[in-house]
Image: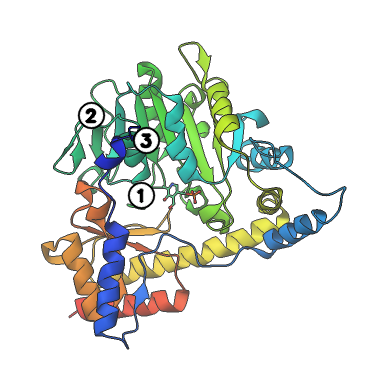
Amino acid sequence: MKINENFLKIQNNYLFSDIAKKVAAYKEANPSADLIRLGIGDVTRPLPEAVTEAMKKAVEEQETVEGFRGYPPEYGYDFLRSAINRNDYAARGVSLSDDEIFVSDGAKSDCGNIGDIFSVDNLVAVCDPLYPVYVDTNVMADRSGVLQNGLWSNFHYMPCTAENGFLPQIPDKKVDIIYLCFPNNPTGMSITKEELAKWVAYANANDSLILYDAAYEAYITSEDVPHSIFEIEGAKSCAIEFKSFSKTAGFTGARCAYTVVPHELKRGGVELNALWGRRQATKFNGVSYITQRGAEAVYSEQGKQQVRANIAYYQNNAKVIADGLRKAGFTVYGGVDSPYIWLRTPDDLTSWEFFDLLLHKVQVVGTPGSGFGPSGEGYFRLTSFGDSEKTREAVARIVSVFSD
Ligand code: PLP
């Protein structure tokens, strides 16, 4: 028996465990320290009441012979696929059929598993910095080559820094699979329809495939920023889209997401929709009825209002962080169409030096940008998912030190 040695090549992403270790050591040395954590990428507001009410009702149905549900359909119940279609697509002028929508337990699993339906022999393009799942799953699948100075030899990297407005540059050669994430984690920056249309044109001209991660779509406030890549003409023949109820409606624990694979998307004469359907039917057994009823309730009138209130809460935190830090002289990005604030570290500090400084001087925990890729060096990520009072307090502490 031989293991898949590609797993050994993956550099354990020590980022969050390194942070945890440093925080634990600081806590031990300073037991009374009042730490504020603005590093987490998890939501803190409870599930909307409309969602929990729908879930409770679904639980009660399970107590009756008539209402009991066994295995769910692998691709999602019709009621949820159609609610997604009506609210997230038809309402935005995008025409899809329900069977182009695959309900799942997370955008993370779908972004990671989608590689199953592609040959190993594909040139993959990724942004730097990035959500690490895109790279690590391609390393597992043997598409990466070897690691040199923090970058894999077979990937095409697209640095996203202040110099290019955090927008990846369209490759000057043919690449096969392109991971795009907008609004972006970690930079918090978004892409306009006009810019995204250039990617769609490139992908169609080169027979490339765009894997579009729109997990943070619900945070978009700018008019010219698309909520779906399928708002761009021509995207159905070159893109797969990932969306999630996690950051939209607080489902990080409940688990529900979906992936759109249009019928128009074909390679080698084969519909990718059919391949993904085959993959899911073989390796995935669906999301629970209770969870899917909860997700459906996100689209009820009450659900929509409650979701909007939660998002507004986080958006307000984002504004407090961005405005406060700007006033203190920081250069701040993101936070407008996204829950993430991406700031330049002051005085040419490295990302980790700035992490240590914030921890030791003001007891605020964030995430070093270099943990998301080499081009994240010199940047730092703060999130708006915390408690609003604590967020204000954290900003006041940082400002008190840096306005001097
Ligand atoms: N995609 C991005 C860019 C993310 O940042 C995250 C979570 O942090 C996910 C996907 C995962 O979403 P889910 O909770 O649906 O698995």
Q: Earlier in the sequence, mark 1 or mark 2?
A: 2
Q: Position of residue 142 (x, y in %)?
A: 30, 30
Q: Is residue 30 left or right of residue 211?
A: left
- The residue carrying mark 3 is 179
At 26% from the left edge and 34% from the top edge, which residue is drawn?
169
At 40% from the left edge and 40% from the top edge, which residue is drawn?
192
Residue type pointed to by label 1: Met
Is the CB–ligand 1 distance for label 1 below 8 Å? no
- The residue carrying mark 2 is 154
Secondary structure of the residue carrying numbered label 3: strand
Residue ranking furthest to the front? 1
Mark 1 surroundings: few (<14), some (14-19) or many (≥20) residues within 10 A: many
Image quadrant where residue 324 sits: bottom left
**Does residue 76 lie above or below 288 as drawn?**
above
Instruction: Indicate how the structure is coloured in the image.
Output: rainbow
Q: Position of residue 199 (x, y in %)?
A: 37, 29
Say which quadrant the C terminus sits in: bottom left
